[in-house]
Image (cartoon, rainbow, N blue to C red):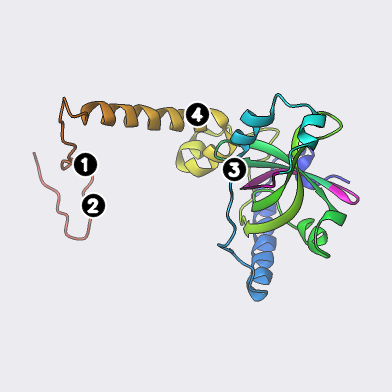
């Protein structure tokens, strides 16, 4: 059985999107009624990128000797449910990794609840590192939490986010869907950090200040247009 959002289909229409949002809001209301909406007590101790750097070169037999438990959190970007087992593509700020979720490894009722979670939800997971039969580095999940309910569906993954106006107006969606945009933001941050540290070095002793900026459109409660 495959999750609907894992199969290639036509892009979501506005009517479908409104229906999906309404369904997700209903799920959020149910979580609030149970007192489980937006928990803030989950603590991660690693990232997907760190796990890949550490274990990408290890075979399945080596990983079986690792006794550590790893906790990480991220956005659920893909989900496949097949009977008593499910696979999730978890994406965090460093990359993505697969979660292998088995019904019998979770507390009673949690797997059934998980099947109703949506693509885009932010989840937390803990478990052991392993390789699947296909050789993919994965986490065998022993603990699973829904941390944040996503209310809006993500763009259909097979077409991606290609609308330029949407990419710039909804930058948060662009950063979720496009690795190139994430890379640009990381590079920009490193450049600014380097320039700042270079200029603030003791031998240069520059001081960073913020200066007023002129805008073509006045803004603010007491702003008045003027000619320069």
Q: Nearer the viewer, mark 4 or mark 2?
A: 4
Lower sequence index among marks 2 and 3: 3
**Residue highlighted by disc 3:** 46
**Residue highlighted by disc 4:** 183
* Residue contact between numbered discs 1 and 2, judged by CB atoms under 8 Å: yes
Q: Residue furthest bottom?
A: 33
CA–CA distance in space, label 2 to label 3: 43 Å
Examine the structure image and report whether residue 193 is included in the region drawn in magenta: no
Lower sequence index among marks 4 and 3: 3
Is the residue 188 above or below the residue 108 in the image? above
Q: Nearer the viewer, mark 4 or mark 3?
A: 3
Q: Position of residue 78 (x, y in %)?
A: 72, 42
Label 2 residue SS: loop
Query: What mark, if any, has residue 40 been given in the picture?
Result: none
CA–CA distance in space, label 4 to label 3: 20 Å
The answer to which quarter of the image holds residue 48 is top right
């Amino acid at each position: 059985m495959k999750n609907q959002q894992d199969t290639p289909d036509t892009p979501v229409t506005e009517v479908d999107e409104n229906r999906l949002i309404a369904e997700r809001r209903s799920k959020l209301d149910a979580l609030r009624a149970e007192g489980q909406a937006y928990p803030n007590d989950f603590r991660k101790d690693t990232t997907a990128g760190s796990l890949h750097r550490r274990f990408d070169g290890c075979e399945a037999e080596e990983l079986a000797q690792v006794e550590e438990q790893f906790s990480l959190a991220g956005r659920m970007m893909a989900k496949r449910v097949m009977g008593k087992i499910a696979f999730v593509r978890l994406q965090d700020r460093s990359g993505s990794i697969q979660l292998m979720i088995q019904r019998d490894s979770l507390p009673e009722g949690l797997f059934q609840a998980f099947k109703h979670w949506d693509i885009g939800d932010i989840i937390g997971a803990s478990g052991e590192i392993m390789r699947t039969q296909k050789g993919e580095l994965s986490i065998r999940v022993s603990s699973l939490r829904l941390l944040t309910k996503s209310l809006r569906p993500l763009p259909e993954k097979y077409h991606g986010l290609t609308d330029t106006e949407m990419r710039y107006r909804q930058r948060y969606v662009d950063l979720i869907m496009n690795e190139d945009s994430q890379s640009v933001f990381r590079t920009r941050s490193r450049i600014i950090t380097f320039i700042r540290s270079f200029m603030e070095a003791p031998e240069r002793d520059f001081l960073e200040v913020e200066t007023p900026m002129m805008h073509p459109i006045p803004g603010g409660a007491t702003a008045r247009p003027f000619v320069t």
